[in-house]
Image (spheres, rainbow, N blue to C red):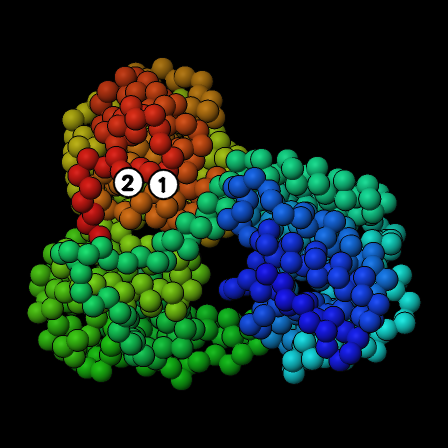
Amino acid sequence: MARYAQVQGSVALITLTNPPVNALSAAVRLGITEAVTRALRDPKVKSVVICGENGVFCGGADIREFAKPMTGPPLVPMISAIEEGDKPVVAAIEGVAFGGGLELALGCHYRIAHSKARVGLPEVTLGLLPAAGGTQRLPRLIGLAPALELITTGRHVTAQEALKLGIVDKVTDQSAQDLAIQFAQEVIGQPLLPRKLSTQLTPCPPDVDTILDEAMARVKQRARGAMAPVACVQAVRAAVNLPYQAGMQKEQELMAFLFRSSQARALQYCFFAQRAVGKWSLSSGAHSGNSKPRPVTKAAVIGLGTMGRGITVALVKAGLSVVAVETNKKQLEMGKQMVSAMLKHDAQKMNAVPRLDLLHYTTDLSELKNTDLIIEAVFEDMALKKEVFKKLSSVCKPDAVLCTNTSGLDVDELASVTKRPELVVGMHFFAPAHVMKLLEVVRGSRSSPEVMATAMHLGKRLGKVSVVVGNCSGFVGNRMLRPYLDQANFLLEEGATPELVDGALEEFGFPMGVFKVSDLSGLDVGWRIRKEAGLTGPNVDPKDPLRRRQGRRYSPLPDLVCEQGRLGQKSGRGWYLYDKPGGRVATPDPDIHKLLEDYRVRHGIRPRQIGSQEVLERCLFALINEGFRVLEDGMAMGPEGIDMIYVFGYGWPRHRGGPMFYAAMVGLPRVLERLEYYQQVHPDVPHLQPSSLLRRLVVNGSPPLDKWRDFLQRPHSQL
Ligand code: NAI
């Protein structure tokens, strides 16, 4: 798995051969070790070049090997042998040098990169740290601050930036391998010691402690409980404070701790789950058929409100030409301005020209004759959407794909008013649509395989994590959110405060607690919906049957808050008090505490002390329970789909793997036992009733997540 050749008389050329990215598997490590030993021993060899085949240097460790017992030579002594040798070794970096690949290059004495190459140490994103000397050699090479930034974020850099930082010595537009071979001959006989990073001291600015302390504070604030970035700072601190060998020891200790952690398992699970959800394919049988995506070059967006604007920006950024239709002239003008501003802002950041030429605005639906795909984003109103879909079906070319961005309306009902229900699909974006990574692709009962593939492919072009979901109320993400929100409100009724609930959720790792998020999105949206459903009223008793409509018990508290003109950030007051209308700095509000106290007195509720464990169990386990129901109903491809929806759309901390992974980590028997307990205490809350799938899994010994599918009673997928 490493080829050996002697070129130009005295240069040994070692080529890593492990497609597709020459990952450092056991066989590759063995190959490199043998080849390096041979080159160092052969008196005819004066210098060495290490490169990778097929234009890729090395993508790093083979993650699949993490779960197995270690075989083959370890990386650290292999890289040390390269560095310690008395012959110059040059790394020829084409494609990528990531993780262990970059650490291998750092053990070489020189690094030559192709201009299109990228390098980086992404281990932190998998809950680990670069443990083959990366945390010790990189600071010695490029200095403390830049090394800290790269190692704690896992950011990749281009060859040009790598040259500026001093990670590589030369960049070429030609073959990096050819230049490296020529270079390897030129450096024969030059002193090697200064090129051996382990023998060097980390360059230390006078304010070294401040830099490290600030980095630690920054990382802790950003990490939301993730351990790996903190360990990265500790390892880099060792590169400053300790001699190389002791620093390596520290690096190994920290790695051993991280490697065994549940966070590393969660992050690695997310890595694979993200790939798996993108590879959606149709099962055979009823759903079989052509599932190749159709070409989409011209798209349209209907409705230039909050969502339509973001979707338009995302489409233009992906290079599609877009017709934006808006019937309200004022909205059209505002939409135009905002779309242009967002595109200009983005282009400026990328040093590019904004593609305003791809845009066309109109008030007239009949201008959509030539569009390949249309995304409807008008008000959430079934009658209006039906009217729009009817028109689209007569105006658009017969094979145009019709998508709706509804947050939860029935896609089949919409499809039924068109002449082409098989070409109708849900594309549920999340706000702001040009920023948020999640896209739920909703399969209606008649959506064709080809149309599903087209929506998935478009999602990919837009840079989204696209997850196929079934056509049920709220689809997957919002459906699971309902019990979570309900529990948060019930906790307030029983004695909690918004800051207590939010504090527990933020401590768990959400960027914002549920009440802060509600204030951010505006409390009036849900209020309007509840008013229309006849579910509000200041004197609704907690046990009032009115609040148990549609099989769900509602808390009137959010309505009471709205009735006081507290609509969230936009009005400067919501569940919290804000510095100003539109302000973002939330402080607990005594008026809200009073409102809660009055409510409890009015309804004879004796407030209890509520701890953060109860908050987490009630909110998260209720959400997870609904996740099991989603699986049971065949509305998600598997637990991985649900988890990616929560990680990319709802701020679930990635280092906890998503709700279903978290349930498996906590232990399904424990989740079941707590749900049973809370259900006894709150028998009138149906969503606390443990799902039958959860029960079945526990009875069957709580099998691992990838076996859950086997326990679905009706293994029918709606997808
Ligand atoms: P919005 O109220 O900001 O915008 C709707 C726009 O559609 C308005 O500008 C309105 O003038 C326009 N419109 C109405 N009838 C039209 C017609 N016949 N032809 C062309 N334009 C028309 O609404 P928002 O928030 O952008 O929501 C749009 C859709 O996206 C809804 O179905 C909503 O449920 C869904 N959605 C909203 C999310 C959010 O966070 N706001 C998230 C995900 C989905």
Name the side, left or right, on which 169 lies relative to 278.
right
Query: Is residue 710 placed above or below 330 in the rendered structure?
Result: above
Name the side, left or right, on which 190 lies relative to 72.
right
Question: Which quadrant of the figure contains the N terminus?
Answer: bottom right
- The residues bearing labels 2 and 1 have C-alpha atoms spaced at a distance of 7 Å
Q: Mark number for residue 512?
A: none
Question: Helix, strand, or loop for circle 2?
Answer: helix
Q: Residue at position x 80%, y 47% from top?
A: 239
Q: Please state which amino acid type lies under the numbered disc 1.
A: Asp
Q: Quadrant of residue 518?
A: top left
- Label 2: how many residues lie within 10 Å, few (<14), some (14-19) or many (20+)? some
- The image shows residue 284 at horizontal and vertical percentages of 19, 56
**Label 1 lies in ligand 1 vicinity (Cβ under 8 Å):** no
- The image shows residue 510 at horizontal and vertical percentages of 48, 41
- The image shows residue 105 at horizontal and vertical percentages of 71, 62
Name the side, left or right, on which 236 lies relative to 264.
right
Query: Is residue 26 placed above or below 601 in the rendered structure?
Result: below
Q: Which residue is mark 2?
A: 709
- The image shows residue 255 at horizontal and vertical percentages of 66, 41
Mark 2 in CB contact with mark 1 (< 8 angstroms): yes
Question: Helix, strand, or loop for circle 1?
Answer: helix
Name the side, left or right, on which 350 lies relative to 442.
right
State ligand 1's quadrant: bottom left
Query: Is residue 436 placed above or below 402 in the rendered structure?
Result: above
Q: Residue at position x 34%, y 35% from top?
A: 624
Q: Please state which amino acid type lies under the numbered disc 2.
A: Arg
Q: Report the number of discs.
A: 2
Q: Residue at position x 82%, y 71% from top?
A: 44
Q: Residue at position x 35%, y 32% from top?
A: 703
Front in this rendered view, residue 33 or 322 = 33
Query: Is residue 365 placed above or below 223 in the rendered structure?
Result: below
Q: Which residue is mark 1?
A: 706
